[in-house]
Image: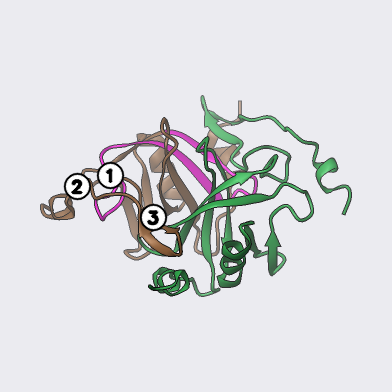
Chain colours: A green, B brown
Amino acid sequence: MKSVAEDLWKALKFDADGLVAAVAQQYDTGEVLMVAWMNRTAIEETLATGRVCYWSRSRRSLWRKGETSGQSQKLVELRIDCDGDTLLLLVDQTGVACHTGRRSCFYRAVRGGALETVSAVEKDPRELYGKT
Amino acid sequence: MKSVAEDLWKALKFDADGLVAAVAQQYDTGEVLMVAWMNRTAIEETLATGRVCYWSRSRRSLWRKGETSGQSQKLVELRIDCDGDTLLLLVDQTGVACHTGRRSCFYRAVRGGALETVSAVEKDPRELYGKT
């Protein structure tokens, strides 16, 4: 039997920076929570631990989702697209995914000729990031 | 009143190639269909026509989804994430989104130690692309 690693690494096409995009979706409600980036190490860690780990392009380091805020993501299933350059992570999100304290990062929508905020802050960001 | 253009262009952060990533999600079922890229012109056209137009990085041209295959996407709502570098397009997909003839491009999943195909071909790709 082929290992996941073998299959997966063959199918994945990392970009010039060694990254693939990853869409995180709440596994039961279907809500798209966020889009971030993963390198090979982040994917390996996520599969090994069952907790989602991204690659932070701004900090240039592994980003274990929730390690500061407590708002972690449990991996339910990892999927890969036809091109092999994007992942879909079905996750179980603890609390909120967005650093603004909203459930999803996609909280602004074009509606009726304006950019509107369409979802409310559920957790105070100061509470999420106040204690490091 | 501020125009959408003003609000939206101020909020968007295009990458060095002038692109943002766009996740297409079926508006009623929540299914994540595909991830592609858009430049400013593609976004303007999509908002103006109500039909989703991407930027094809491989062909370096506007890609009016479905213009060859007939499998178009009607825009229901355009959302933008907290960073301004990713869009979530709530769409109504005609037929299938994937060039393989599957509903979603994310048809492979890591399951039980292997990469498995988890959704079936619904339309023969030869039928979709045979007549240009």
**Quadrant where the image shows the N terminus of chain B:** top right
Tell which circle, 1 or 2, labels the residue nearer the N-terminal end: 1
Highlighted magenta segment, given as a residue range: B76-102
Residue kind at label 2, given as amino acid type: Lys
Q: CA distance from mark 3 to mark 2?
A: 24 Å
Task: Count neighbours of disc 3 (C-alpha within 10 A) and say few if under 14, some if 14 to 19, many if 20 or more.
Answer: many
Label 2 secondary element? loop
**Label 3: chain?**
B
Mark carried by residue B96: 1
**Label 2: chain?**
B
Camera-side residue: A33 or A113?
A: A33
Per the image, the residue denoted by label 2 is: B123
Q: Is label 1 in contact with label 2 (beta carbons under 8 Å)?
A: yes
Q: CA distance from mark 1 to mark 2?
A: 7 Å
Picture layout, residue B51 above or below residue B84: above
Task: Count neighbours of disc 1 (C-alpha within 10 A) and say few if under 14, some if 14 to 19, many if 20 or more.
Answer: many
> In the rendering, at what x and y percent does residue A1 appear?
38, 73
> In the rendering, at what x and y percent does residue B51 appear?
34, 38
Q: Which residue sits furthest left?
A: B131
Residue kind at label 3, given as amino acid type: Trp
Q: Are marks 3 and 2 on the same chain?
A: yes
Q: Are marks 1 and 2 on the same chain?
A: yes
> In the rendering, at what x and y percent does residue B97 appear?
31, 47
Per the image, the residue denoted by label 3 is: B55
Label 3 secondary element? strand
Picture layout, residue A69 above or below residue B26: below
Picture layout, residue A127 above or below residue A2: above
